[in-house]
Image (cartoon, rainbow, N blue to C red):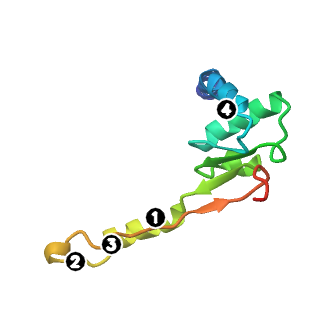
């Protein structure tokens, strides 16, 4: 019970600290009346942006679109549009590199592998006009 309480407290503290640090940035971004979308560095920041916009009465996605990066479970459960790095394809490529045949000579490291991600479009981004 104590360890769980500690983890919950740590999460709350981290979220409170993140919220306090982001508030001035969000205030400036909201003052830019020509902005139609906010793209956050990760889903945690995007979730804070959604909370901030909700507190300010800004309708998402009607008035402002919001997107994050990471495609976390929190983004899924909250309908946040997010960039997905395609982890299953990444793991497959890593395993293929580790377990596959070893090239020899100058190309000892093998070819560069590009793994395409995708946008997990949900309820926080409106249609492009």
Relative vertical location of residue 89 with respect to residue 39 in this rendering, above or below: below
Other residues around mark 3 within 10 Å, as few (<14) / some (14–19) / many (≥20):
few
Other residues around mark 4 within 10 Å, as few (<14) / some (14–19) / many (≥20):
some
Other residues around mark 1 within 10 Å, as few (<14) / some (14–19) / many (≥20):
few
**In this figure, which residue is indicated by the disc labeled 4?**
29
- The local secondary structure at tag 3 comes to helix
Please state the horizontal and vertical placement of residue 80, each as a whole percent of the image.
72, 48
91, 52: nearer the viewer = 52
Please state the horizontal and vertical placement of residue 43, each as a whole percent of the image.
63, 43
Q: Are marks 2 and 3 in contact (CB under 8 Å)?
A: no
* C-alpha distance separating marks 4 and 3: 47 Å
Q: Residue 91: which disc?
A: 1
Other residues around mark 2 within 10 Å, as few (<14) / some (14–19) / many (≥20):
few
Q: Quadrant of the C terminus?
A: bottom right
Q: Residue 103: which disc?
A: 2
**In this figure, which residue is indicated by the disc labeled 3?**
99
Please state the horizontal and vertical placement of residue 46, each as a whole percent of the image.
66, 40
Q: Quadrant of the rendered structure where residue 53 is?
A: top right
Please state the horizontal and vertical placement of residue 51, each as a whole percent of the image.
76, 33
């Amino acid at each position: 019970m104590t360890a769980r309480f500690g983890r919950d407290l740590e999460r709350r503290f981290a979220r409170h600290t993140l919220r306090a640090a982001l508030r001035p940035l969000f205030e400036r971004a909201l003052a830019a009346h020509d902005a139609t979308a906010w793209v956050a560095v990760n889903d945690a920041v995007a979730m804070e942006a959604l909370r901030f916009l909700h507190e300010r009465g800004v309708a998402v996605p009607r008035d402002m679109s919001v997107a994050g990066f990471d495609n976390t479970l929190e983004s899924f459960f909250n309908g946040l549009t997010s960039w997905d790095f395609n982890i299953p394809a990444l793991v497959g490529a890593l395993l293929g590199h580790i377990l596959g045949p070893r090239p020899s000579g100058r190309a000892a490291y093998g070819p560069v592998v590009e793994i395409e991600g995708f946008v997990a479009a949900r309820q926080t981004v409106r249609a492009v006009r």
